[in-house]
Image (tube, rainbow, N blue to C red):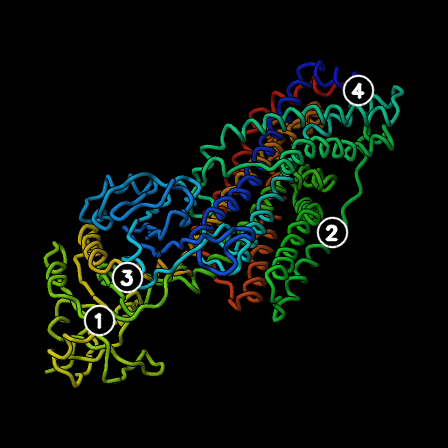
Amino acid sequence: MIGFGLRLTLRGGREAAIRLIVTACSVALGVGLLLVTLAAVNGVNAQNARYAWLNSGQPGATSAGVVPSPDPLWAMLHTDLYGTREIVRVDVAGTGPRSPVPPGIPGLPGPGQYYASPALDKLLRSAPVAELGARFPGTRIGTIGASALPAPNSLVVIVGHTADELSRAPGAVPLTTIATKSPGSCSDCRVGTNTDGIKLVLSVTSAALLFPVLIFIGTATRLSAARREQRFAAMRLVGATPRQVSVVSAVESTVAAVAGTAVGFALFFALRVPLAALPFTVEPFYASDLSLGPREALSVAFGVPLAAAVAARIALRRVRISPLGVSRRVTPRAPRAYRAIPLAVGIGELSYFLGRRPESTNGQIQAYLGGILLMMIGLLIAGPWLTMVGSRIMARYTDRPATLIAGRRLSDNPQAGFRAISGLVLALFVTSTAVGVITTFVAERDAPNAPAIAKETLVADFSEGWTSVLGVPKASVAPIPDVVLAGLRAIPGVEGVATIHTNPLGTEVSNGGRRPIVAGLMSCRQTAGVPALGRCAAGADVASITPFHVYNSTSESFRDTSDWPAAAISSEQLRGLPVQLLVIDTDGSKAAIERARTAIALAFPDRKPAVTPVEQDGFSETARLLTGYRQLVDVVIVVSLCIAGCSLAVSVVAGLNDRKRPFSLLRLAGVQLGTLRRVVILESAVPLLVIAVVATGSGFLAAELFLESQLDYTLRAPGAQYYITVLAGLAASLGVIACTLPFLKHVTGPETARNE
């Protein structure tokens, strides 16, 4: 029977060839999406592993078995800025021939030498020297290899020094090993995504992408199911046994699935390079990151054809039981209300954790993703019942032929009606949940729109060390030389320079309603050129100011007219005090900001870079987290909608094949073609709109339960962009359905009504 099944599949005429090609193409697209999803998960892990060396010096960051070097490496890591881009700078100095060497370079750079990543080297060649290149004096002796760069566009520089010079720099530490453990398996690592974060990323990706892709592949394997059932029923009537029919069905489905799987692998490898350039998690991948492990490749290569064969066997259960039942199109059993139970269980599971949030990350993943998956499965199970309810209501309250026929057909087989839009239902649920969570998260944690003053004022903070894995807190700097201040004032676009000094008097100032803090001291003559610092009380020469008042300029309620009280200290005494902050007012131009930042970096190379208040907020861990979440949500929404579109297109093709015979009989009975076209639209639009409302509401409910349980937030309404996206998606779906209407005339001719 296998040979007979192959002949039917490969030599069964034009209809069999079209069915084979369409099914294989659909499976290929689904397999390609599945492989991309699996490879992206591996890519996140591979990218995260290349952050390992930047955690050198952290406890547990080095794998067991790495032998410490007898010649320590002095190292200091901090992050610089150029525009909106971060530059990772690592200063190194060896103490002997066996000092550890960071990955990606053949050897340590000597004094006055540096290695730059390819992206930074390109930036150095294009940016004015006074704005960027002057920060790295010396000679570039090579480029940093990919093994040390998280992404192709990473800006990284390794600068060489003498051991005597770097050992005296605040924040430099001696290293005997280079960290090799991925941040994903290192709880103390600060650079990269830690264990909890990587679990969250992988769990979200798996739940939001893999499940819809698998549904799509299942939909593709059921193309022309009705026609196949009729043909196999005819085989049963002429004497074929149930086993023989099952073998023929399995062969037909497996051939299409094998061909589609092979093409899907070819698509993945052909598109891997351009896909790697897409920033799934803020940064793009190297093409080699999007790789497949042997287990994953074999699971897809054998699992998809096997699943297709099983699906074909399940789909022919009515043929095995009664061939006449299929030939006479016996109405399947109507779905019952109990199909809504899994959806209710998922809602109840999420509701249970209100006020009972699990403490561990694994517990949270199991609790929240388990409930969300239950709701997704519940929507698929309850969908046919909801479709039946909507169709019966539509048929009960209409006297139009098209509406009545569509309602009766949907009520007769709601499973088929829902199957066509099941992919879009999942996409709407995933989109609503993701948008609800990220909208609320951003509203609670994101900084408001900052005024212009927060974008034009540059602040060099000398009060503590940069938040680096190798750095340690540093005290304020000694009084800044006049030559440095004069050089800053001479930069075109710099309109004022002021310094805030430490306060030996211990006087306190108000801190926005909270308990008072020790004030900083500033010269009132300098304040006039820096509006962000406010103004001094009348007659004051030196004033007490909240040290970090300028950082508050990102707030919409910021007041730059504060009257700071006079301090009991003279200007001469002030000049001799250490400096906490150096505040520079600019005209907001990129050239002025970057030249001033470069001048400060040259004057104080061991201090963190000067930043504007807006950059300070954007440089925080919260901002990075928000950026990553936004990117992840964008990927989930785009991919899920693409999958939904593919599922709908496949279902439309399958629907045309399944409708050919009954619609041909209706045309022979005198039904107008226009009526049949309205029937097609209603059969798809009714379940689409009914289930879309339920899916969207369920998504927002899942988001609300998660936010309230995990973060104690209340769901915020999404912006207009979400509603526009949803309406556009529904309109596009109806457009796809409408595109099939011109073909209805050609596939419902009298010849289609013949008996097999």
Gap between marks 4 and 2 measured at Cα = 38 Å
Label 1: how many Cα within 10 Å (few below 14, some 14–19, many 20+): many
Which residue shows up at 73% across the image and 21% down it? 753
Q: Which residue is mark 1?
A: 579
How many numbered marks, from 0 up? 4
Q: Please name which of the two marks, 2 or 1, marks the residue nearer to the observer.
A: 1
| Residue 595 on image: x %, y % | 18, 53
Numbered tag placed on residue 607 in the rendering: 3
The reply to whether callout 1 and callout 3 are in contact (CB within 8 Å) is no
Q: Which residue is mark 2?
A: 339
Gap between marks 2 and 1 measured at Cα = 69 Å
Q: Disc 2 or 1, which lies upstream in sequence?
A: 2
Label 3: how many Cα within 10 Å (few below 14, some 14–19, many 20+): many
| Residue 739 on image: x %, y % | 53, 30
Q: Which residue is at the front of the view, 680 or 258?
A: 258
Numbered tag placed on residue 2 in the rendering: 4
| Residue 736 on image: x %, y % | 54, 34
